[in-house]
Image: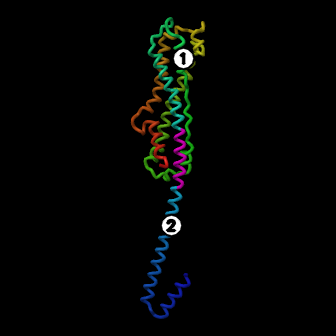
Amino acid sequence: MIKFFRKIRQRLLTENKFSKYLLYAIGEIVLVVIGILIALQINNWNQTRIIRQQEKVLLADIHTEFEYNKSELESNLLRYDQSRKSLSRIIGLFPIDNRTINLDTLAILLKQTHFVGNYDYSNTSLEKIRNSSSFDIISNIELRNLLLHWEVLLADYLEAELRAINHHEESYGPILSNNIPRPYVQGLKDPRAKLEFLNSIEFEGLVNFRRKKINNLFRLIEQNEVQNNIIKMIDRIIALSSED
């Protein structure tokens, strides 16, 4: 093809048809430029197609991961909520008279206050995005911003949960164990049990503080704004990462 165009140019020059040669040369340049532009457009189209395919795979991973995160978090919070309700019921019994209190009911309530969660979340897809610097692949700006903010909100939740766990492990559990043997169904009826402890300010403070630590977890669930509500944020990420 190049040889064919060269012969045409040579023939026009030898025939002294300079004006035609000039027009032909310009036309040839235009064709070359058009060819380059078409090649660039095809290359851009291919790159865009590849990126969109990568985004599709990435969104599928995010969607699956956050559905798992939601399931694990809801399971965790369900048990914490049960503990919170049991603590509230015990608080409703204050001041406790250990001579008249139904020890079987109290034993069940005390048992339910001992749940210590450990949110088993997955962060694989976000680690992959961070390590490959591929946040820009996500075309939805809202989803991108939510994923960037997710770890901040998750850190707040994990910090609140860690405080609740530490209080249970360092204070709540040991102090109760020093006064009432477990399991409580037998322990409250054990002659070694210090039932007068149930009527103490220390016991009331211990139960109140345990409920306060668990309540701090739910503050991150009961916010109205998506950016401050961990469940709402997960739901929004799941919705935006859906193929639909």
Tell which tag, 2 or 1, sits nearer the viewer.
Answer: 1
The image quarter containing residue 186 is top right
Determine the residue positioned at 51% across, 26% down: 80
The first of marks 2 and 1 along the sequence is 2
Q: Residue furthest left?
A: 224
Highlighted range, magenta: 53-68
Q: Position of residue 89 (x, y in %)?
A: 46, 17
Q: Where is residue 164 in the image (x, y as percent from the top left)?
A: 51, 26
In this view, the residue in front, 38 or 198, is: 38
Q: Is residue 130 above or below residue 108?
A: below
Q: Is residue 186 left or right of residue 49?
A: right
Q: Is residue 113 above or below residue 144?
A: above
Q: Which mark is residue 108?
A: 1
Q: Give the quarter of the figure containing the N terminus.
A: bottom right
**In the image, residue 66 lies in the stretch drawn in magenta:** yes
Determine the residue positioned at 49% across, 20% down: 86
Q: Is residue 143 above or below residue 85?
A: below
Q: Mark 2 points at which residue?
A: 42
Q: Where is residue 33 in the image (x, y as percent from the top left)?
A: 47, 74
Count neighbours of disc 1 (C-alpha within 10 A) and say few if under 14, some if 14 to 19, many if 20 or more: some
The image quarter containing residue 188 is top right
**Secondary structure of residue under mark 1:** helix
Looking at the picture, which amino acid does disc 1 mark? Ile
